[in-house]
Image: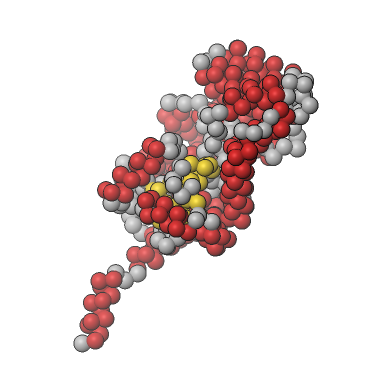
Amino acid sequence: MFKLYRIVSLVTFSLLVLLAVGSLRAEEHLWQTNFDAAKAKAKVEKKLLLLDFTGSDWCGWCIKLKDEVFDKEAFRSEAPKQFVLVEVDFPHEKELSEELKAQNQKLQEEFKIEGFPTVLMLDAEGKLIGRTGYRPDGPKEYVKHLAEMVGAHEDIVGVTAKLEEAKGLERARMLDRLIEDYATLDNESDQTDDWSKEIVTLDAENKAGLKPKYECRLLMAQFATLKDAEKFDEAKAVIEKIVAMPGVSGQQKQDAYFALGEIYFDRKDFAALVGCLKNALDASPASPKVADIKAAIVRFKDVAEAQENVAKIKTDLEKAEGLDRAKLLDQLIDARTKLSRFVPDETLSEDVEKWSKEIAGLDPKNKAGLKNKYEFRALVTESEQLFGKHKIRAAQTSLDQALALPGLTGEQVQEARFLQGRCLIGQKDLSGAIDCFNKAIDAAPKGPQAPMLKLLIQRCKSQLAKEKAPKKGKKKDAEQEDAK
């Protein structure tokens, strides 16, 4: 998958990380933690294994996967029919036994897990079948996705048993099925390149329609090698060759343009990246990736414009004064903030803090609507800095001042209320945090932080319920006291 799809919203991640109140897993009978015991169970029950590599109390996408899929009845009732479920956890707050930590670390190394969540499908012997991760369409679609993976695995077993006796175009078609099945499992066989070359030879006259497909695949492998060697001009030439080939499908052209776009992303040339994305969209406008492509175009078009505007704004600033300078500084902050999502900007925070004060001074009567905006911004920044230094009361005071400013938008109120809730969590006042988060949602029900705020409210309530539940020992003592 093109790595642009994997860019994670830092804001979303930080909201979840800051909570740090733990994550309650499903019942132990549903999710095993002992891998050897899970394998034994899978063998007895003739099931497959499904391993969830997770950071249960800090990884935002892990928490979303759990809440949106694993904790839903549609998954909980169907998945155990075919799988023994295993949680392989790497928490920050929750304590694990040394034995469990060692087991999980060994599994992470064995299966080369590089990010969370990663979900692996294994056979009962512990051999990798396929891998997946977070998917956004809910539990029913996730169960369907897993069923497709199982189907691909079963097809691989069946085709492999017949492959040795197959010849000519029949063998070419069977090899094509194997490659597609492994792609469904996101578990490419180490024989894929050899199979691709064999298919090109077996279908030399393209009677099965497979020759251009696998010539393209071999060229894409060549592209990847050149890209890794940072031979960008040669890699670009390979992509140009692919899209010009007769018989190449629109989907293959789309994948080629995506690959070229990755080069431009790495080189931070966002205008060229947007051009690649548009070419990818035109190549296969009905592909399953269309929604993602369009979203990426919108995102990176904005960044490309910001990249172009920064230099121009800096030039215009040299002669600007008064409100004109305030407006340009506002635009510069916006442009650099957008760019900083993808291009490191070490001085941005310092510059924003300095310019925020200058803008408020240049627009003292709020004629351009900037004074209140940047007084608010300066106070919020100050609060975040104080919170980082564990000066929570001082941070709350800055937020109170920010919320007292006139003319705040609903999204500004939401931002400040969220930060207030974070301060209260730091003081272990979960009830107060829930109240702040509810007020944040009321201020902007469709605001950018609303979905995460709802999740945070749920987690705070879960933690409160856990804290209020009587301890087993205390409950027993109370029962004995009542008996007396």
- The residue at the point 57 percent across, 40 percent down is 185
The foreground one among 17 and 387 is: 17
Q: Is residue 224 above or below residue 476?
A: above
- The residue at the point 58 percent across, 48 percent down is 150
Q: Is residue 446 visible?
A: no
Residue 263: % across, % down: 58, 21
Residue 113: % across, % down: 43, 38
Q: Which image quarter: residue 26? A: bottom left
The foreground one among 43 and 406 is: 43
Along the horizontal axis of the image, is 5 left or right of 173? Answer: left
Residue 466: % across, % down: 37, 64
**In the rendered view of the protein, which quadrant contains the C terminus?**
bottom left
Q: How many marks?
A: 0
Q: Is residue 208 visible?
A: yes
Outermost left residue: 484
Along the horizontal axis of the image, is 348 left or right of 280? Answer: left
